[in-house]
């Protein structure tokens, strides 16, 4: 339970009266030399911008400023050449005044953070999310939105509760990241301040939202600043070990290759590696160029591993390449998954059918194994065991395995023939997305 002294300390963080005396949160300097002195002085704003380590030349880049307030950071991004969009919960007259004085072309949108996905914005190279997170009841959901809109780096600034324990370079480790919850006005006597995370918790939230890696920058006035990157650091020029060999990338729950964007879905990667004692923090999984932190690592036989990653936010509908490397290696080869892709089959055709125990084609299926192997054409690109039906006589059967296309465009499909069928000949057809294949005969023999 939060002690009385801590509650008193949090409530003292109320700068409403001081802010009101300035009238502006950001200081502003205009081309004619006029300077408006705001709550944040110009030299501190400039230093904070420098801390983001953005390229000096942002021409041809897109940037988003969420929670722009008076807009100093939006206009600074534009001054460096970026095409900028600024978003805030309410229309801020200071922003409009400054935009007019600066003859700025920054796009200004009034929107709640949770409504941003409905704006259908194109992704941005760089996103600023400054002083917003702890004002939100659903911080992780908001960070997932930020991540989905970022292709390179997002700068995140938030109130933290362990700021008095930090210097500018060290984040103290914690056993489990945690944060305080403010039910009413415990933080700054403000009813829309909801959370106070530790710095480690802030960084963990950003990683969990989908960012590949998170860098601690510094802490000032009880606010920690972190840089959240969508991509891994560059692979070493001189690898210190061989790359992993990726054998499969499948849906963790249904073992298929189809995923839905915007849902909490996980990809399991099966791979081998010559590294004997592998740690999940050494892995660098990647999906369509976006890094995805390894959440777990398990080992089966020696050298055989599986790791789970969250489907990265912001993936567009279509086919996506999955690969991974270790910190000291190059990337593996690719497997592929599909996101929000409808199942469109061509004309289905079973061309060959054989015994799945002996793997010989055009022979009968033995009653002991009852395992058939067939080769089919016309299957959809994103076919998996969840969207392909096999019907043996009138009995629907789920496939055991669907392989990749061979050089002839055929895919191997394995199926367990129902045990209740008697010996003899039975009809087999494939069904997918409203199409039905030709009929083949499976002969179950003793």
Image (cartoon, rainbow, N blue to C red):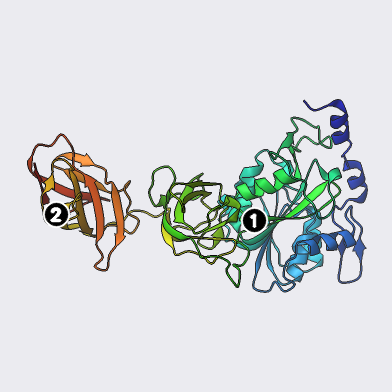
Q: CA distance from mark 1 to mark 2?
A: 51 Å
Looking at the rendered image, the disc whose residue lies closer to the viewer, 1 or 2, is 1
Q: Determine which of the numbered discs, if any, sits on residue 438 in the image.
A: 2
Furthest-left residue in this view: 424
Quadrant occupied by the C terminus: top left
Q: Earlier in the sequence, mark 1 or mark 2?
A: 1
Residue 405 vs 436, above or below: the answer is below
Q: Residues within 10 Å of mark 2 (few under 14, many from 20)?
A: some
Q: Quadrant of residue 149?
A: bottom right
Instruction: Say which element carries label 1.
Output: strand
Image coords of residue 377 (percent x, y): 22, 60
Image coords of residue 153 (percent x, y): 66, 61
In front: 244, or 164?
A: 244
Q: Residue at x 28, y 46 (%)?
A: 400
In front: 115, or 211?
A: 211
Instruction: Say which element carries label 2.
Output: loop
Side (left or right) of 74 relative to 390: right
In front: 74, or 319?
A: 319
Q: Residue at x 39, y 52 (%)?
A: 257
**Mark 1 lies on residue:** 213
């Amino acid at each position: 339970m939060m002690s009385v002294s801590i509650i008193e300390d949090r409530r003292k963080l109320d700068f409403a009266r001081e802010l009101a005396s300035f009238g502006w949160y950001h200081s502003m300097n205009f081309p004619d030399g006029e300077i408006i002195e705001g709550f944040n002085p110009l030299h501190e704003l400039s230093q904070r911008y420098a801390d983001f380590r953005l390229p000096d030349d942002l021409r041809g880049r897109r940037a988003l400023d969420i929670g722009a307030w008076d807009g100093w950071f939006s206009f600074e991004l534009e001054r460096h050449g970026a095409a900028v969009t600024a978003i805030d919960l309410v229309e801020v007259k200071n922003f409009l005044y400054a935009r007019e004085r600066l003859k700025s072309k920054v796009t200004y949108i009034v929107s709640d953070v949770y409504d941003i996905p409905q704006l259908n914005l194109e992704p941005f190279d760089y996103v600023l999310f400054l002083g917003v997170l702890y004002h939100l009841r659903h911080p992780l959901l908001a960070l997932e939105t930020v991540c989905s809109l970022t292709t390179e780096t997002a700068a995140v600034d938030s109130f933290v509760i362990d700021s008095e324990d930090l210097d500018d370079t060290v984040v103290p480790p914690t056993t489990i990241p945690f944060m305080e919850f403010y039910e009413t006005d415990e933080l700054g006597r403000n009813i829309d301040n909801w959370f106070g995370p530790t710095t480690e918790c802030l960084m963990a939230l950003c990683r969990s939202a989908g960012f590949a890696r998170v860098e601690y920058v510094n802490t000032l006035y009880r606010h920690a600043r972190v840089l959240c990157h969508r991509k891994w650091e560059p692979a070493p020029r001189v690898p210190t070990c061989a790359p992993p060999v990726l054998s499969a990338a499948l849906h963790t729950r249904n073992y298929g290759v189809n995923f839905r964007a915007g849902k909490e879905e996980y990809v399991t990667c099966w791979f081998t590696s010559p590294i004997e004692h592998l740690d999940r923090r050494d892995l660098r999984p990647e999906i369509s160029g976006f890094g995805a932190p390894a959440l777990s690592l398990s080992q089966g036989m020696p050298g055989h591993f599986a790791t789970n990653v969250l489907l990265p936010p912001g993936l567009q509908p279509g086919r996506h390449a999955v690969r991974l490397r270790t910190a000291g290696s190059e990337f593996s080869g690719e497997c592929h998954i599909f996101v929000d892709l409808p199942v469109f089959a061509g004309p289905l055709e079973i061309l060959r059918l054989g015994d799945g125990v002996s793997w010989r084609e055009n022979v009968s299926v033995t009653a002991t194994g009852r395992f058939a192997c067939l080769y089919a054409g016309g299957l959809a690109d994103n076919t998996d065991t969840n969207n392909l039906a096999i019907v043996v006589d009138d009995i629907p059967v789920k496939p055991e395995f669907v392989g990749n296309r061979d050089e002839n465009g055929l895919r191997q499909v394995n199926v367990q023939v129902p045990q209740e069928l008697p010996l003899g000949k039975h009809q087999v057809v494939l069904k997918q997305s409203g199409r039905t294949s030709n009929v083949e005969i499976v002969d179950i023999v003793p």
